[in-house]
Amino acid sequence: MTSPNDDSHDRSGEPPDHTHEHAQHVERGVDDSSSPIDRGDVAQFSVPEMDCPSCAGKVENSVEKLDGINSIDPQVTTGTLTVSYSREQTSAIAIADRIEKAGYTVEDTSEVTSKFTVPEMDCPSCAGKVENALDRVGGVITYETQPTTGTVAVTYDSSRAGEADVIDAIESAGYEVTDTSSDESEQQEPTEDRESIWTSPRALKTWISGGFVALGLLFEFFLTGQNTQIATLLGGELLVADGLFLVAVATGGQEILRNGYYSARNMNLDIDFLMSVAILGALVASLVFGEALYFEAATLAFLFSVAELLERYSMDRARNSLRELMDLSPDEATVNRNGETETVPVDEVAVGDIVVVKPGEKIPMDGTVVDGESAVNQAPITGESVPVDKTTGDEVYAGTINEEGYLEVEVTSEAGDNTLSRIVEMVEDAQANKTEREQFVERFSTYYTPVVVAFAVLTTVGSPFILGTTWSTAVVYGLTLLVLACPCAFVISTPVSVVSGITSAAKNGVLIKGGNHLEAMGAVDVVAFDKTGTLTKGELTVTDVVPLNENSEEDVLRCARGLEQRSEHPIGEAIVAEAGSRGVAEREIDEFESITGKGVRADLDGTPHFAGKPGLFEELGFDLSHVHATTDGGVVTQTARQMCDRNNCLDLLEETVPELQAEGKTVVLVGTEDEIEGVIAVADEIRPEAKRTATRLKQLGVSRTVMLTGDNERTARAIAEQVGVDEYQAELLPEDKVTAIENLVEEYDGIAMVGDGINDAPALATATVGVAMGAAGTDTALETADIALMADDLTKLPYLYELANDANGVIRQNIWASLGVKAGLAVAVPFGYVPIWLAVLAGDAGMTVGVTGNAMRLSRLTPDVAEADSDA
């Protein structure tokens, strides 16, 4: 549906393919006395690369090839091109295309994106009316309606249309715009108490309508003696009950008929139009043909108004899940400026400002702690159940809660660009990525309504002849089918489930970038893990210290610290860190020397010492098959204890070192020229929760778990055995990981790749679903991953898989239940089994409330905190 005044309109919401859609259009009035050739449009283009007369000549020659060009004015000094043209013969898009064909880029100078809050737009048919209205606005480039959040995002050319034009268009469709935010100043929805749905003006009219329906029924069935004629309309008598039913239609049907008018005006075959036809059809049949269907008309007006209120209430519950995310960030911040503190709106806080956060307050902005220390509850961002200690130099996020201490935080990002804002924005944008089921539903719904409307007409016309019903009964059957003709509950069944699932995940520290990724995660057969930083912590640590020749562990670490203190190797850094954490004293170091590929040498307190591979000590003449273990005061490995029982000696070469290496550890020997003082084993420690995660995934239905690593075969095998994955592939380069994923994709239906989001980007992109670990504060991971685990917490992976599975189940339930109920009711109507009130309450309101309530069940699913804590 392309606007007749804007060739660049793209209703799909996808970005334009060419930059020529970004031309700046300048409408100018033309005097009536001007010749016809002077009439037309004037478009101005920003062409910064057109910076010389030769460039201008090439652009002119290219544009002149178009028909309908009246004049061309290139301005080299400003890099702009002004073209007068006839809209009947060409367009701004075609002109921009000719500029690009001359080799020059047209820059965007006037494209603006604004988001409009339209709370009453809460179903697909409402969105359809808004879309039809926006189609008629010249200058609108793209739009995206989101009934589940009640928002409309519109991108328009500000030189041809303004915010007021868009608002007018939306309101012309019958919907009020309550808030607006542009792409420059994104604002959150106000958090003040919202008007209760049940006491709104429409609700009051509905209750009044219901009162008159009840009075009408009283006279119709109980006070029959008082149900006398009160007037004559078009030759027919009007009884007291009929008059009360007409008043009920007048009060309860106002909004329905109003919305039906807008539907007709926007050529939208939706529920408002169908209900308006049904109500007016009942009235016409009563007044003109004497069929006395006043009760049916009143019932439709009242019950459908109740249905609309229920639908609004259900949708508001779904929207609250997203509002809760938006409300996490405080509106104000306490800023320290010029030695004084002042409270200002967060929008006025600049990067570099120092904000003061007292105990119990929310941190208002992303930043770095410059003073103070405290435990910070990061659950709103990362989903971590245990507060994280923060001190000077640590990063903190907006929306997290300062538990106990005083903090001063230097702001590192603006309010609209912090981690929480990006999460909220991505959760909102995630609705645009439609699942396969959602696409199927939308395609199906385009055929459903016309088919049911046709069935309603056939039923009305054919029932008297085929089933022998009266014409009044046939009309009622037709009206009932019109009520069932709108697939609102069917269409809303998937997006409301997606929104519930995505927002629930976001509140638990899992950012899902689209409904399609949520659906794909639920269909995963194989989960592939990167090793370093995913199954392991990504940091080398000392795992074993085996003292030898009557030395203690502290003696070994003291020598190793001295030897490795000047080394920049990660193994050396791990040993120094371990010695420091144990409070081991330093030694005087002289004559430090790195022995390439073997280890290091240095004089410690004047005595030469060595640290390195077993081969280094073999070269020094040691017999590694027979060394004495320390038995007093030292803690040795299980292997060492077993060997010590046999003559108090160890065979490092054949027993101890291979045993440690088989566990995926790197072995360092420490000693002098005369004595081996001890053995230190270093490894990238496995995450405590890794094994439970792999086990839990298998319990939930994952067919296979695979570890992909660039590490050596021996280490990979050891890690794989300890974690419990089904398969491992070692010594892989990044491109090898991509090949491994491609092979898995060919063999299985769905593959999830879990990695750090940066180094494993190619493999993440190749997998069906890419899951990034520890993405909080990491722009690259947030932008590139399909799904991001905001904290370094593998226990969120089984939760994610379970949530995705449940979401797929809920979507299937909603689709088939809504479709089945509608179809069953429609088939039963011609046989007289479905009264019109049942069609309204069950077929429309009941199913809408039902699918929404079913979808909200997803918010109850949370990570297993108890097990996660025990792992930690």
Image (cartoon, helix red, strand yellow):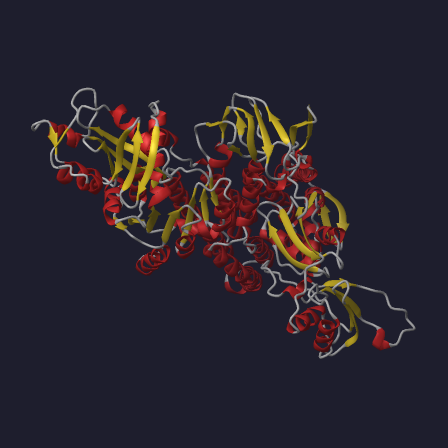
Q: Quadrant of residue 560?
A: top left
Q: Is residue 12 above or below residue 700?
A: below
> Which quadrant of the rendered structure holds the N terminus?
bottom right
Q: Residue 491 appears at what percent x and percent y?
A: 53, 53
Q: How many marks?
A: 0
Q: Is residue 511 above or below residue 155?
A: above
Q: Residue 838 appears at what percent x and percent y?
A: 53, 46
Which is more toward the observer, 257 or 836? 257
Q: Is residue 106 left or right of residue 778?
A: right
The answer to whether residue 484 is visible is yes
Q: Is residue 588 above or below residue 4?
A: above
Residue at 85% over, 65% down: 29
Spot the residue most to the left: 647
Q: Residue 142 appears at what percent x and percent y?
A: 64, 58
Residue at 33% over, 23% down: 584
Q: Residue 430 appears at what percent x and percent y?
A: 53, 49
The answer to whether residue 835 is visible is no
Spot the residue most to the right: 33
Which is more toward the observer, 386 or 438? 386
Q: Is residue 91 above or below residue 384?
A: below
Residue at 26% over, 32% down: 609
Residue at 71% over, 55% down: 261
Q: Quadrant of residue 157?
A: bottom right
> Which quadrant of the rendered structure holds the C terminus?
top left
Q: Quadrant of residue 670?
A: top left
Q: Is residue 445 left or right of residue 533?
A: right
